[in-house]
Amino acid sequence: MHASEPPMREAKAGRPECLASATGPDLVDWRRVGTALGCATLPAKKRPDAVDAWLALAAARHGGAVVFTTYPEDICAYLSVLAPADVHVVAV
């Protein structure tokens, strides 16, 4: 029987390092997502996207976050409603 190779680096899966990442959404978070969905000024021909709104909220909860996305206008629209102080969006 052959032993598997050790990982190249320590895996931290399942061990969130910040409280915002360690806890799931609560009712207040879901209401914030709903508000972002209803109030965001999205680019023309775009429809509200719950995944994008949740991503924006997760970044806002995390603090000091950087979101890399191919749809920066969409994420920025949700962030403008949520108004976090320190979330940055980078187009890729």
Image (cartoon, grey):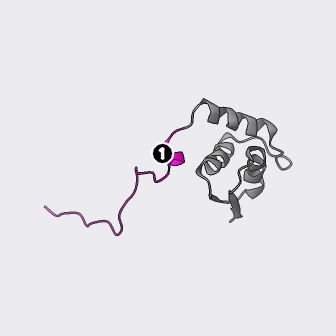
Disc 1 crowd, CA 10 A, few/some/many (<14, 14-19, 20+): few
Local secondary structure at mark 1 = helix
- Above or below, 17 against 41 in this view is below
Task: Provide residue 14's location: percent of width, then percent of height.
Answer: 40, 49
Residue 17: x and y, percent?
Answer: 46, 54
The residue lying furthest to the top in this view is: 27
The residue tagged 1 is 22
* Residue with the most extreme left position: 1
Q: Nearer the viewer, residue 85 or 45?
A: 85
Residue 86, given in percent of the width and then of the height, sits at 68, 57
The one nearer the camera, 45 or 61, is 61
Q: Height in image: 9 above or below 80? A: below
Which amino acid type is marked by label 1? Ala
Q: Main secondary structure of the magenta part?
A: loop
**Magenta span of residues:** 1-24
Tell me the quarter of the image containing the C terminus: bottom right
Q: Is residue 10 above or below residue 60?
A: below
Q: Residue furthest bottom?
A: 8
